[in-house]
Amino acid sequence: MAAEVLIQGGVRVDLYDAMPSVGRKFLLAGKGGLNLTHAESAEAFLSRYGSRRAQIEPLLDAFGPEALREWTRSLGVETFVGTSGRVFPVEKKAAPLLRAWLHRLRADGVSFHMRYRWRGWDENGVLCFATPQGEQLVHVDAVVLALGGGSWAKLGSDGAWVPLLAQRGVPVAALRPANCGFDVGWSEHLRTRFAGYPVKSVVASFTDSTGAEFHRQGEFVVTATGVEGGLIYALSAPLRDEIEASGSAVMQLDLAPGWELQRLIDELSRPRGSRSLSSHLQSRVGIKGVKAGLLREVLSATEFADPLRLAAAIKALPLRLVAPRPLDEAISSAGGVAFEALDERLMIRDQPGVFCAGEMLDWEAPTGGYLLTACFASGRAAGSGVLAWLEAGAGGK
């Protein structure tokens, strides 16, 4: 995005990428259907950026969801709004959009250099790259660093840039997993019986140590080590922060949304005759399979047989999460270059001509199109920032 702004502004642009081809994480994001952005109200959209809303909002004011949809249209890719409000390309795939985009960039004059891994600067402030041909030094008037966060290292986002900036005194918050799964520590029975099973139509609630409350409805997946999936990702930031602060986080699950507690008690208190407790639970309340397995995981046999305790657990089953999954497994990462170290153009204040964009900045957002939209917007902002800096006489074109 930065390259597009710059080439259209008449600047010579060279784009360097450590990988053999560009956009590998972009392609992965579109593997299950490229969720570009979201069609909800501006206020709801901006609220997804949490404590960094103030820094992200100006970027989205300049290039928000509607501008992004218009941009994709200019590349010949139409979009549609799904039932959840998420916005996708009509074909739902990332590859056609990326192909059209790269074709336009190359036609406009952007030069691409693959397998160039940035290694920082030499003693004269010249960019250093490790390449198949050995070390290459590149003289530039300005540079936009868009090096990603720390998740999915095999696609290029390995966080190797962190010490390169930190050693130059740039404030960098530690990279942490975001939109991630969590470890629970299941019993061997639950792990072997239900790992990989989806838990659908539930409400997750969580209250952190400050009293802040979070509620989300959706579904998640039981894994061999714990839980992951859309519902978990939506709560991952406060859950992760609570684990860091307190050592664990207790999330409560409503396994039967729409059922009143008293109705559950009444149904479970009915005589079960010769039926097993599991059959009784399924026939009276409709809970079976992995949901029943979760109840047995948390409740003792005595509690499971008590209609009052069983009903209470169905409405508020406590799950203790003990650790987020490793950073490299996360969909995205939190942490990165502090916005306080940047000016309004996204240039590092004490590193003239060095701009930052994308996930390497210190912000996070849930899945749903918010990550991609802000990455696009920050790239355009950085490109515009470089143009303004060059035009002010800071460097030649």
Image (cartoon, rainbow, N blue to C red):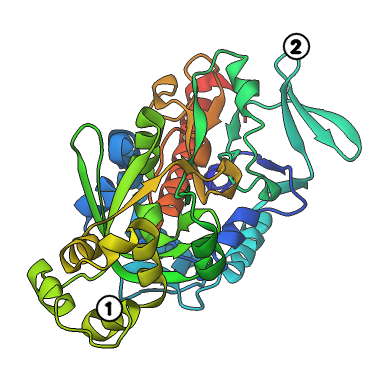
Q: In this view, does 268 lie above or below 275?
A: above
Q: Is 388 in front, or is 257?
A: 257
Q: Residue furthest right?
A: 133
Q: If you read the primary sequence from the N terminus, does the residue marked by circle 2 or circle 1 appear first?
A: 2
Please give the name of the residue rendered at 34% of the width and 64% of the height, measured from the top-left corner.
295
Dot 1 alpha-carbon crowd within 10 angstroms: few under 14, some 14 to 19, many 20 or more = many
In which quarter of the view is residue 260 placed? bottom left
Identify the amino acid type marked 1. Leu
Q: Give the side of residue 363 with respect to residue 154, left or right.
A: left
Taking 248 as reference, is 10 left or right?
right
Q: Which residue lies furthest to the left in this view?
A: 262
What residue is rendered at 62% in x and 14% in y?
167
Residue 341 marker: none
Q: Which of marks 2 and 1 is in front?
A: 1
Label drawn at residue 123 = 2
- To which quarter of the image does residue 216 belong? bottom left
Residue 68 placement (x, y as % from top left): 41, 58
Q: Position of residue 149 (x, y in %)?
A: 55, 39
Question: Mark 2 belongs to which amino acid?
Answer: Glu
Residue at the spot x=20%, y=61% of the render?
309
**Crowding near pointer 2: few (<14 within 10 Å), some, many (20+)?**
few
Q: Quadrant of residue 169?
A: top right
Q: What residue is disc 1 on?
A: 281
How far apart marks 2 and 1 lie (CA) works out to 71 Å
Q: Is residue 358 visible?
A: no
Residue 162 x/y as whole percent: 60, 27
Identify the element where label 1 is drawn.
Answer: helix
Residue 397 point in image, percent of width and height: 62, 31
From the viewer's perspective, tell me whether residue 28 is left or right of residue 171.
Answer: right
